[in-house]
Every structure is written in structure tokens, then in C-alpha cells.
Amino acid sequence: MFPQEVMDVIDTVLRHNAWRRGETINLIASENVMSPLAELLYVNDLAGRYAEGTVGQRYYQGTKYVDALEDSLSKRFARALGATFVDVRPISGTVANLATYFALAPEGGLVASLPVKFGGHISHNTVGGLKALRLRSVELPWDMDNFNIDVDAARKVIEEKRPNLVILGASLYLFPHPVKEIAEIAKTVGAYVLHDSAHVFGLIVGGVFPNPLKEGAHVTTTSTHKTFPGPQGGLIATVLGDEVNVQIQRAVFPTFTSNYHLHRYAATYVTLVEMEVFGGEYAAKVVENAKALAEALSAEEITPVAERQGFTKTHQVAVDVSRFGGGDKVAALLEEANVIVNKNALPWDKSVLKPSGIRIGVQEMTRFGMGRDEMREIARFIARVLRGEDPASVRRDVATFRKAYLEIKYGFKINREIVDKLFASLNLYT
Ligand SMILES: *Cc1c(COP(=O)(O)O)cnc(C)c1O
């Protein structure tokens, strides 16, 4: 029917789908699945279109429908977050960050941020985004006992070094950062405060994690596909005035993007509506499940970090697996058992290249309908692998277990009628 190499590609996609959607327990903290309706709408003609510029001021013709989508998406996010300005054009969280740094920090400027081992994202550091812009960085100090930023030590650093921008928010993110406290200090030296909400955005929109814009951050950036279960994308939201907002807008285009992956707007919009309907329940369940998984692991004598603080207040759980051979080895072994996690550096690691931990996120399995009991099952699967059982035998049990959780909750379902209408509108088959 198709050339063999095309058949092979199709086969690879089908196998991947069946494996990741039907056989694995996916615990990657930065991933998620869209709702059926959002995923369906992701297939649309805008995948091949351009709309350079801003709503109403485009450099291309043919944009009347995408103008309406981009405008309503920005406004709905602004309302949800209490923001004065939202830019939904960044195609990812990293691009949202770069555009924000470019707009807010002067040439050769100084940024205070967390290194990767304290949870900072690569784009917060001079190995990543800061390097591209030739910005300098200074580390925000970490309090090992509280598993959070050390506010008093940070005050000294900020007052002494006077950064132009302070970045809060993280990729390993167990407890809300002290946005209020740091923002007060930052403002005394005239620094902007950016909270990178990539990981916790769904929890913020769901109302179970503090909204950084209400806590004193000037700006928040995010990905739209981690705990917020939309298509991959980014956005910038601010409580700043027009002058700075225009600088950010100009940084997004023409500096950092040209096409904005317009086909994601409809799916992102539907996801936001779904979050308004189901998001409170979903987000609360995610945090409850993370805590339940941490406690269940602890009962299996695989105690996660930050036990004294109650393990987590987000979707994440982090485990120091150095006594089981380290993050690399454990993550690979778990994959053999169809349990998908990532290795992760922990604050006390000497080198981020040899991470001692694994990071676990429960948001996706929560969307597939799992709760406390299922978290206990997952802890048992992990424990069996770590205690040396053959991963292949665990894998068979994981696949069987997973088969009972195939339906995506907390979103709108689809039917054949809407599928047919959409495909007919694209003339995909006649
Ligand atoms: C994932 C992540 C990003 C980057 O997001 P992308 O959409 O993958 O570019 C930025 N910041 C933090 C804190 C993240 O965890």
C-alpha cells in the first residue's frame, strides 16, 4: 500500500503509541497527555501557516481565524492568572525564558538563579539560555535542611551583587519557592523577578499552588505541556506596564520566533477551558497522589528526599538512589520494567553528570484515573526492581496493571461525528 520504508515509519509510530499509552507507567515529571478533544484539534491546517507579528498587525494575509484564536487564548490566560499581559507565541518554555531575559536584562547583565543541582532549569544557567545571551549569573543559595532557597543568604547575594533579574521556579520543584520574600528583596535593588512556572503551571491554574503573579513576581513564564496538559508550547504572563510588555512582545517576534506553531492554539484553548472545568479536582488529586506515592515508597524502605518536610507539595517526588547504583542505572532498569522516570541531580551531588537521584511525576497517571491505591502498586513495582527482581518479570505485571487505566479523565471526550467533521474539513480523504 505504501513504500516499505513508509510502512516502517508507520509501524514505529503505532508501536510507540501502543507502548507509551498502553503498557508503560509514565512518571516523567515534565510530560503529560492532552485530552481526546485537544489532541484531535491539534491536527489542523494551521500547522503549515504563518502569522508573523501580533493580532491585527500581521506580516501575512489569511490570518483572520488565527487572530481570533490567539487573541482569545491570550485574554483567557490573562484572566485565569490575573495578568496584565500574556504572550502565547513562544513555542516553548525555553523560548519564553530567552525572550523575557532579552527584554528585561541589559547587555552583559547579571541574573541570580538556581544551578541545576538545586532544581534550576538549564535555561536559567550559563550552560544554557544565559550563555546564548551572554548574560552572567550568580547562584541563589540553597538551604539543604528546608529543601528550598535560603532567604537570608539570598538577601546577602542580591544586596551585594545587585542582579538585574532574579529567576525563581524550577525543574526539580518540591515546595513553592519563597516568591514573596525574594521579590521584596529584589525590588530594593531594582531587579525584575521572574517565576518560571513550567512544571507547576497546571497546579497554579488548578488553584493548588501559589500564583507567582499574586506573590510579587513581575513575570511568569511557562511551558503549556507539563502539569498543564496542553500541547507543547510556551507563554509569558506579566503584571508589568505597557512599555515593558511591548519590549517582551518585540523579543518574542522578531527576535526569537518567526512561526509560532499556530496549530497548537486551539488545543491549548480547549485545555484551558478543561482546566477551568476539571482543573481544581485534577490538580488536588495530583498533589495527593504525589504525597501518597512518596509515603508508599517510604513504606517500601525507598524513602524519598525531604521526608521531614512531608516529601512534596507538587506533582513531583525525588528519590536518592545512590545505594541502588545511582540515577543512570536505576532509570535504565526501571525502563526495562516499563516504568519511565528520569535521572536527576540532587542538591548534594558533586556533578550533575553523575546524578544520584531519580525524579518522579504523577500528573500523567493521575489523568489516566489513578489514585492512592494505584500509587501503592507503583511503589511496589519500583521496589521490586530496586531490590533486584528481574525487570522483565516486573514488566509483565506493569503491562497488565496498566491495561485498566486507558481512558483520559479531566477533559472533553470525542465521538466519531467530530472526528469525521474535522478530517472532512481538511479533505484528508474523499
Ligand atoms: C521544562 C522547563 C523549561 C523548558 O520548557 P520547554 O518547553 O521544554 O522549552 C523551562 N523551565 C523549567 C523550570 C522547566 O522545567
Image (tube, rainbow, N blue to C red):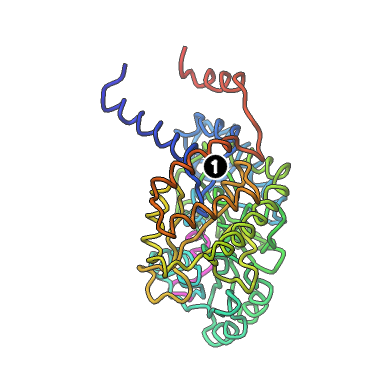
Picture coordinates of residue 85, whole percent (x, y): 65, 55
Residue 85 visible, this orientation: no
Whether residue 57 is situated above or below residue 428 in the rendered picture: below
Three-letter code for the amino acid on which mark 1 is drawn: Val
The residue at 47%/34% (across/down) is: 47
Q: Residues within 10 Å of mark 1 (few under 14, many from 20)?
A: many
Q: Quadrant of residue 7?
A: top left
In the image, farthest residue toward the left: 4
Whether residue 309 is situated above or below residue 123 in the rendered picture: below
Compare residues 18 and 220 and report the one nearer the observer: 18
The residue at 37%/55% (across/down) is: 332
Ligand 1 contact, mark 1 (Cβ < 8 Å): no
Residue 367 visible, this orientation: yes
The residue at 35%/33% (across/down) is: 12
- Residue 101 lies in the magenta-colored region: yes
Asked which secondary structure carries label 1, the reply is loop
Q: With 324 as the anchor, is 184 left or right in this view?
A: right
Count up the numbered dots.
1
Q: With 269 as the anchor, is 97 left or right in this view?
A: left
Picture coordinates of residue 15, whole percent (x, y): 39, 33
Whether residue 373 is situated above or below residue 21 in the rendered picture: below
Compare residues 401 and 86 and report the one nearer the observer: 401
Picture coordinates of residue 372, whole percent (x, y): 65, 51
- Residue 340 lies in the magenta-colored region: no
What span is in magenta? 97-110
Compare residues 234 and 3 and report the one nearer the observer: 3
Where does the N terminus fall, quadrant-wise?
A: top left
Whether residue 336 is situated above or below residue 343 in the rendered picture: above
Q: With 1 as the anchor, is 255 left or right in this view?
A: right
Q: Label 1 belongs to which residue?
A: 33
